[in-house]
Structure formats: C-alpha cells, structure tokens
Amino acid sequence: MIYFAWFSLICFFMGSFLKLLKINSMPLHLRAELYPVAHDPKHSYGGSYMEEANYVQEVKSGLKHIWINDVIEILKEVLFLARVREYNIYGLWLPSLFLHWGLYFLFGWIFLSVFSVFWPFYFLIQLSSIFGIVAGIFGVLGSFILILKRLFLQELRIYTTPLDFFNLFLLLFMFLATLSTFLFNANHDILMYLGSVISFRPVNVSNFVLVQFFLFQLFLFYFPFSKFMHAPIKYWTWHAIMWDDALTMKGNKQDLTLQEQLKYKQYWAAPHAIPGVSWAEVATNLKVEERGNNNGNKKTTL
Amino acid sequence: MAIKRPPFNDISKDLKEPMAPIEMEDLIDILGIDKSEETPLEPTSDSIKNTYDWYLDGHVALSNLYPPKSKEEENEIVKKFLSGFEKLLDPKNNWTMLQILKTGLDYCVRCQTCSEACHVFIASGRQEIYRPTYRIEILRRIYKKYFTPEGKLLGSFVGADVDLNWKTIYRLAELAHRCNLCRRCAQRCPVGIDNGYLAREIRVLLSQELGISPVEILEKGSRLQLTVGSSTGLSPMALKDYLEFIEEDTYEKTGIKIKFPINKKGADILLIHNAGEYVSWYENPAAFAILFDAAGINWTISDEPVGYDNINYGLWNDDIEAARVVLRQAKIGKDLGVKRIVIGECGHSTKAFCVIGDRILTGDLSSSEISRESCLPLFWEIYKSGAIKFDPSKNNFPVTLHDPCNIVRNMGIVMPQRKVLSGIAPRWREMHPHGVYNYCCGGGSGFAIMQGLNFPQWRNKVSSRMKLNQILNAFKDELDPSIPKYVCAPCSNCKGTIRDLFVHYRCKDKFNLTYGGLVELMVNAMVDLKKPYITWEEY
C-alpha cells in the first residue's frame, strides 16, 4: 500500500504533466476564438478589437488585455459550474456541484491531514476531519445522483458508456469509504497511515482506512488516463483556443511558428489535393487547368 | 410530438425508413403562422429514394454522393475514411485544428449542456439526431474503436461500438450537414468543447481525403472560383458588363453617377464583395459605391479572378481550399498596393479572410503588413466622421438586425452596426437573443447555397425556423401587412437564406417583410438622395 501510494502520486503528477505537455505541444491551430473573449475589455457584450476600423494599427500600438477576467471566468466554472447551472436542463448542476466540491474537500482533507502528521494540532486535526466529512457527504450525494440521472434519463443514458458508469461508481465508492472512516471513528488511523506513507514504515490500520486509501490512490493513478482530466484541460480549450485572439505580426514568434508549420508536408488525397507537398505548396498551387484569363497554377509566394 | 432517439448503431444498418423523419407536428411553432397554413412537407420522392442513401431524416444534402455499386467500392470508401481519420489526428496533416479536435474527442463529458443552444435541435422538436453531441458521439465511437488502445482492448465498454461501413460514412456526412457550424453550442460548454468545429472536422476529412462535399461548396464553389474567378461563374469579362449595368441602373434610379474604380493602384481600400451581390442584389455594391464616393474614400475593386469574389467556402469544410483563396486575395491586395482590404457584407468570407487567414498568411502578407477588415466598422467611421448627412426620418419604418454568426459571435464585431442603426433607423429594435448570442439564420456553413434535391425543404422547415420566429417576434406588435418592415442582414448568405425563407412562408404577402443589408439603409437615409433607395419590391 505504501509503495502504491507513492506510485499513484507519481502517476498522478507525471501522467497529468505528460498528457498536458502533449496537448500543449500540438501545433499552433488556426484562430478559433469565440466571443465573448474573457480578457477583451469589451467582454461585457462580446466585442473585440476588430470592431475598430483599421484595427491593425491599434494592435500594433498595443492592446489592453484584462487578464484577470480570464482567471475569473475559469474560476466561475471551476467553483460554481456556472454554465451548467445556467444552461443544463437535465438537472445536472446540483449533483455535479456536489461532486466537484466533494473532490475539492477530499484533496483539502488529505492536504490538511498530511499537515496534521507533522503538526498534530487539535485545531488542524478537527479541521481536516470536517473537510473529510463534508467531502464524503458531498461526494456520495453528487456521484449517486449523477448515476441515477445517467441511468434513468434517456437523453443522458444513450451517451453514457459502461466506462462512464465505472468512473462514477469509483467516485461513489471512494466517497463512501471516506465517509465510513469517520462514521467508524478511524481518524487516528488516517494520520497513522499517512505517517507510514511519509516515513515508509508499515503500520496496522483499520480496514476502513485501507479501503479508503486504496480507492483514493486508485483514483490518483487512474486520473491522467481518464476523462477526469477534463478539469485541467479547460486551460487549453478556453485560454489557448476559445480566447486566443492573437494577431499575426510580421516577424513575431507566431509568424515564425506559422512559417514553420506551413512547411509541414501533407498527404491529403482528394482529387483537388496534392499529396506529398507542403502546406505552403498546396496553397500556392491551385490545381486548376490553365485558362486564358485566370491565375490557375500561378505560383504565389507565402 | 414524438422524439425519436435512434441508437448510434442504426447509422450503420440496413434501414427501411429514415432514422428520424421530419414531421410537422414535431416542429416548433412560428409566431403568426399556423402550421396548417404552412406549405406541407413534401415526402421524399421516389427518385431520391432510388438514387441516394436517404435514411437519416429523409432529406439529402449531398446530391453528388451515390451509393457504391460493388463490395470493392464499399471497402474502398471505408479504407479511405480511416486513412483520412488518421490524417485528421496527425499534427502535420491537420495542424490547423488538431488541438481542437483532440480535446473535443477525448474530454467531452456528455453533460448535454450545449444542446439547448442549438436552433436546429430545438426547432426540430429536440430530435436526437440533431443534438450537437449526437454526430460527434458517433465520430468519437469510431475514433475509440480504430485509433485508441482502450477502444481496441475494451471495445463497447469504452463506447467503441459503432460499426463502420459505407452507410455509416454517408449518414455521418449527411449529419455533418445538419449543423450550421454557428458555434452557439461551444459558448455554453463548461469544458470548452467545440462541437461545431468538430462537425467541421468531419467535413474536412470527407472533403480533403474522399472529395466528398456538397456540389455547391466544392465543385461549383471553391473549385469554380479558383478556375473561373467566382463561384457564381462570373468571369472578369462578365464582371465588367455587370458593373456597367449597375452604374447605368443606379443613375437611372437615383440620379447619382457612380463609377466602380477597377484595379486602382495605391488606393487606400480594396473592397471585395461576395460576387453573389453583383448577380442577385446589385443594389448592395451600388450602395457601397454611393457611400464611399460621398465619404471621399479612395477605394478600388479588383477584376482579378478570386479578387472580385470574396467567398471562401473552404471555411466550411476544407483547409486546403481555404488557404488557396485567402492567399490569392491577399496577394491581389498586395499587388495593388492598397493599405487595407475591406470585405463587403458577407459573414463567412469576413471571418475566413480576417481570422482564418490570419494564421495562413505570413511574412509580407501577415495582418500587420496588409490589414483585412469587415466593412461594418468602416460604416461607423463614415457615419461618425460627419462627411455624409443622414436623415433618419427617411428610414421611418420598423427595422430589426440579424447578427451574422461569423461576424458577431466569431469576430466580436457587435456595436458598429448597432451604432449606425441608432443614427439612421429610428424604429430599429433588437431580436432576442442577439449579439454574440444570436441564432444563426439557418443558412450558415453552406446551407444557404445548397439548393439540390430536397435539402431546401429541410433548411426552410428546420434550420431556419428559429430565425423566422425570432424575426416575427421582433415585429410582434407591427405584424400588420400595411406596415412595411425591414430585416437588416449584413451578410450575403444570411440574405439568401432569409429570401428563401420569406418566399417559402409568403412573408411579403402576410407581413410585408423585406430584407437587405446595412449599406442600403445608410444610402436610403442620405440627405443627398432625392428618391428612396429601398424600393420594397417583391424579392
């Protein structure tokens, strides 16, 4: 169990890091911003710098971005699931909110418990217990209602795979185990177990605690390979895609990156495509028959 | 009302009836139009039934997609589809959209929060096949089955359970053409998944690998544009004839002499219209000429092929064609030595040239070297400069504003058109919802120009239904046909859709509704114009 604890922790951080690194290192995509863009000063109504005639001059002189809005917008989703609350008609907001806060409290509980191992103050231990109990209650409620919703609402059920149910049941059992450690007053054992993990010295603890930590460690290990990763992915889907309104300026980093990407060879095979040549070449060769008054096949420099 | 929820695997099966046929009683009500008074739904003709795979909803968007004739052909289609899918997942073949595709395929939690944003889904009576996640779930299940280790190992446990055959591909192609790519669903996604762009990725795969695309978009669209110069078939020679006709007609109607400046080197602005304007709504380019001349703008148009037609249908399904068009247009502007290229009232081309083009054009053609803009901010500049005197009382009729998705939701150009309207149209009012939360006209992503087989019926009955309801609600207190009403739609494709919609629902007779651009309203309000510019003629 001790080795599994460290292994799951390493998997959690390394796996997540590598997954995110992979997404981050994907090529620079075409602009796909969607308004309102949070950092735009005209965010309140969804406006952009392109509302100005000759906006390029304005961009050249430096745009004002309100970066804090990006943080606020993401926090609104992370903390309150704002869009789910506003737009979901299948009653998913409250159970999802419970489940998410269950996880936040769960991590808070583990974090505080680790502190309590080093600094076993009464207040800290009590606070960590409160976090654990709240995590258990919220998590059980959230995951259980979500399972019911996905089982009995046809609109959700047809999209829910056995793996999705496995994920929800994993969370349900993990939160049930969390709750049971408190119901059976195993608080002391929790600290002992965490202490043993930190010191690499095995100890005997109650089965409730063993089950709880086994499931929690399984969750950590499994996290990077699962859909649970949708949480950190938001940074890319929102910040790097939906809010990416950066204009290409001659010679800037983006311009140079794009020039490199246009050298990539592509192998699309439709009749109008030219497999085996670079994007720059396929764009300059129109692949049309020469006609008297057109520019077919006329090369153009990128 | 019956909501049909066909299982995902129906898409690959031999069927006797469509998966979800359209039925009148399922469709949402439209204000002021009783369903019994509507043109009834035409059943799928025998000719379509005998020629096409019509089993999605009884309608066919791809009029050039015929079922394979042999087992070899069937296998070839599947092989090419998988080969295209592999390229879609490859960073070099699909650098343009890979990050968007991968995050969407891997991390959608299928909470269905996006569904209620979709006008097609709602207008259809919430038929499952039109839910923004439905077509993507099929794509995802194919992806899992063929391209992920967990799908290969665990199969249906992880949802890798859609059978892939030619029927799956054909129906998925049809499904990808039941989405306007308006991206309203993406605004609502708590994870930031863009089901609109994922639907476009299906189209990209089909177009770039299999050459499968609606005939109006590829063969008679961008292919024709790159060959002849315009998707309308308008050659440079024919363009000159049109321009001369427009100049003469404008003089007759308004007493104002206009002369389209062609290939004027060193002009401040190169104006590129959707060539459809010259052919179908020539009062629009004429109004630009009147306005620009009156404002003292140094402008030109080009008669170079592609340079006089701003359309870029690759925006909807093909990065290769999109890149070719933006490159030609930018090069033409550069050669003319203009300071800015301004796109006329056309939504998709404005986005293609300004936003998509921004990451295709580099170095000397990058945005910093040659500015590419929508015409709407320029209208506001002209208005506020005071160079032209406007009399708003000339536009003393109810006006509502349609927000083209590509200009508003996709570019954030919201206020300039509203500020202009506030100055020239005293009775203009918003639709609800509006601005970046508007509903698509229903013609977005190519639907406006797709006139083959029975697809226009689907568009008029389903995808444009929400827009008509919105328009009529905006005028709900003045629906009386004695009051002429104007829908301001500063986008060629939106205008085309609204024209067809008004004809289909007889909106001229019933409500005295007409439509047009913003520039026509501006010219109509010009003090110097002696006669009304807007004629309220039948469309």
Image: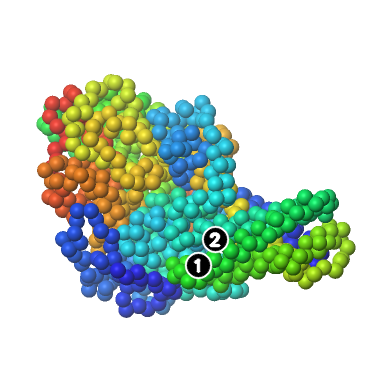
Residue B83 image position (x, y, % from top left): 50, 65
Specify whether disc 2 shares its chain with disc 1: yes
Residue A260 image position (x, y, % from top left): 57, 44
In the displayed structure image, the side of residue A163 where residue A18 appears, left or right: right
Q: Is residue B56 visible?
A: no
Q: What residue do we see at 35% from left, 55% from top?
A: B119
Residue B113 image position (x, y, % from top left): 46, 57
In the displayed structure image, the side of residue B294 where residue B116 appears, left or right: right
Q: Which numbered marker is on residue B200?
A: none
Looking at the rendered structure, the secondary structure element under dot 1 is: helix
Name which residue type carries label 1. Lys
Classify 10 Å Cα crowding around label 1: few (below 14), some (14-19), many (20 and above). Answer: some
Residue B434 image position (x, y, % from top left): 35, 44
In the displayed structure image, the side of residue A141 where residue A44 appears, left or right: left
Q: Is residue B32 visible?
A: yes
For disc 1, the chain is A
Q: Quadrant of the N terminus of chain B?
A: bottom left
Q: What residue do we see at 14% from left, 41% from top?
A: B483
Out of A65 and B537, give the one closest to the viewer: A65
Q: Is residue B260 above or below residue B386?
A: below
Looking at the rendered structure, the secondary structure element under dot 2 is: helix
In contact (CB < 8 Å): disc 2 and disc 1? yes
Q: Which residue bears the numbered disc 2?
A: A95
Q: Is residue B412 above or below residue B31?
A: above
Q: Which residue bears the numbered disc 1?
A: A149
Name which residue type carries label 2. Pro
Q: For marks 2 and 1, give the CA distance.
A: 9 Å
Q: What residue do we see at 57% from left, 67% from top?
A: A144
